[in-house]
Amino acid sequence: MIKLIILLLLATTITHAQVEHNLPKGLMLNLDFEEVSDGLIPSKTLYPMFVPLNELGIESFNNRNMLAFQFGQGLDIPHSSLLDPNGDEWIISVRAFPLTDGIIVSQSNEKNGYVIYMEDGFIAARIRTGHSAFTLQESPDRGFTKYKSRWVTIELRIKKDTAILSMNRKRVSMVRLQPALAGDNLHIRLGNHNTLPSPLKNTDLPPSGFTGAINSFKIIRQ
C-alpha cells in the first residue's frame, strides 16, 4: 500500500512538472478594452480571463477605448500559471500614451521579472533573470526619443541569451548572454505600485506609476 501511494505521488509530480514545462504557446494575454462590461476587462485568448477595473476608467480616443490611469492608480492582472514565463521566449507588447514618468507595467516575483517604465520622458526596461540585472534603453549615440504625451508601442522580447526592446517597431536596445525568464508567481501590475518591483531594487527609481492611457496590452509565449 505504501509503495502504491509513493508511485501515485511520483506520477502526480512528474505530470505536474510536464504540464509546467509544456505550457501552451501563443497569445497568453490580450486585454480587450472594446468589450468591457460590468467593470470587467476580458482577455481575448483561448484561455478566458476577466480583469476587474476597480477604480480605473475607460475613455475613448479616435473611436477606440483605452484604459486611463490617474495619479496613484494601478491595475492588477489576476494571476494564472499560464502567465508564468517558463524559459520560452516571452514577448510583452503595450501601446501607451504616457503623460508623466513612472512604471507602465511590471511582472515579477521576489527574484526575477521585468519592468517597463518612463523616466525623464524616455522609455526603458529593467530585467532581472537569474543573478543578472540589466537595463535596456535607447543608445546616446543614436539619440533619445521622448514619448511624453505621444502614443508609443513598446515591445520587450526576453529569451535565452537575448533581450530586445523595440519601440514603434524599431529595435532600440539589445542585451546578450542573459538567462531566460522563468519562475513561479510572477505577478503583473500596470501603473502605480505599492512596493518596488524586484527588478528595480538597488536603483533610485520609485514605485510610482505613470499617468496616461493604455489601449493595448498583450503577452505571448513563443
Image (cartoon, grey):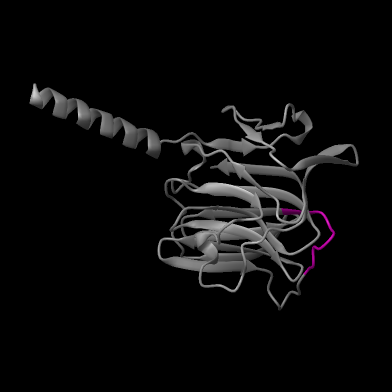
Q: In what quadrant of the picture does the N terminus appear? A: top left
- Identify the residue at image location x=76%, y=28%: 35
Residue 95, position in %: x, y? 74, 49
Our reading of the magenta stretch's main secondary structure is loop
Residue 11, position in %: x, y? 23, 28
Q: Is residue 86 left or right of residue 39?
A: left
Would you place residue 151 above or below residue 26 in this image?
below
Farthest residue toward the top? 1
Q: 31 or 195, which lies in front?
A: 195
Q: Is residue 186 magenta?
A: no
- Identify the residue at image location x=52%, y=63%: 199
Q: Is residue 14 left or right of residue 23?
A: left
Farthest residue toward the bottom? 141
Q: Is residue 158 left or right of residue 110?
A: right
Q: Is residue 151 magenta?
A: yes
Specify the quadrant of the image occupied by residue 156: bottom right
Q: 140 or 51, which lies in front?
A: 51
Specify the quadrant of the image occupied by residue 99: bottom right
Q: Magenta part of the protein: which range?
A: 145-153
Would you place residue 47 above or below residue 197 in this image?
above
Would you place residue 73 above or below residue 29 in this image?
below
Residue 187, position in %: x, y? 52, 47
Residue 220, position in %: x, y? 58, 42
- Identify the residue at image location x=46%, y=37%: 81
- Counting the numbered discs, the total is 0
Q: 173 or 97, which lies in front?
A: 97
Q: 173 or 118, which lies in front?
A: 118
